[in-house]
Amino acid sequence: MAKPLSEDWRIRVVWAVDGGMSRRAAAERFGVSVSSAIRFVKEWRESDATRAKRVGGDQRSQRIEAHHETIMRAIEAKPDMTLVEIAEMLESEHGASFAPSSIWRFLDRHGVTLKKARTRPNRIDPMLQRRAKPGANLRRSSIPTSWSSSTRPALRPR
């Protein structure tokens, strides 16, 4: 990425324009683009600043940060909310449209994780997990009678 033009060059362009030279002529004389010369002079006239602004970094997170309290309250009320549900809630209540990825980055910045409670269902009998005790005998009817790829016996070598 290109670095910003030094403050010395910026001051020279601004002084040349202030001294009566046109922006285009000052740009040509100092070897900068016309749009840069126009921007330097405009910024100098508006804020008396000639220093370059910061390059890069986050430019948009303040949009979602404005809804910080709303998002945190919604997650507190419903901890298993999905990113899409948060986006829909912000859209319907505040008219603010955010992609789920933007919401994820917001939550990541604030150290919030949305984890769903997951339990592995018993393939044989969903109720068996709650009823079976260690060492208990299984009912014959709860074992599947058809073969699956994981339970099929291996082929005999010829």
Image (tube, grey):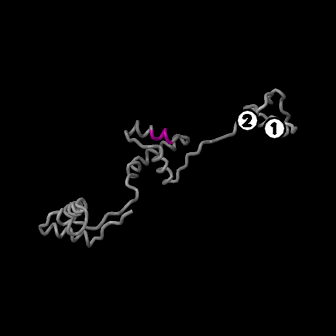
Based on the picture, tell me whether residue 61 belongs to the magenta stretch: no
Return the residue nearer the eye: 34 or 96.
Answer: 34
Return the residue nearer the eye: 84 or 20.
Answer: 20
Quadrant for the N terminus in the image = bottom left
Q: Amino acid at mark 1?
A: Lys
Residue visible at 43% across and 44% down in the picture: 70
Does residue 141 appear left or right of residue 90 in this picture?
right
Q: Amino acid at mark 2?
A: Asn
Q: Which residues are magenta?
A: 83-87
Above or below residue 32? Residue 91 is above
Residue visible at 69% across and 39% down in the picture: 120
Quadrant for the C terminus in the image = top right
Does residue 53 appear left or right of residue 11 in this picture?
right
Residue where numbered disc 2 is placed: 122
How many numbered discs sit on the rendered protein?
2
Circle 1: element type: loop
Residue visible at 51% across and 52% down in the picture: 108
Based on the picture, tell me whether residue 86 belongs to the magenta stretch: yes
Dominant secondary structure of the residues highlighted in magenta in the image: helix
Above or below residue 30? Residue 35 is above
If you read the primary sequence from the N terminus, does the residue marked by circle 2 or circle 1 appear first? 2
Whole-percent x, y for residue 76 in the image: 51, 44
Q: Residue furthest bottom?
A: 8
Does residue 20 appear left or right of residue 107 in this picture?
left
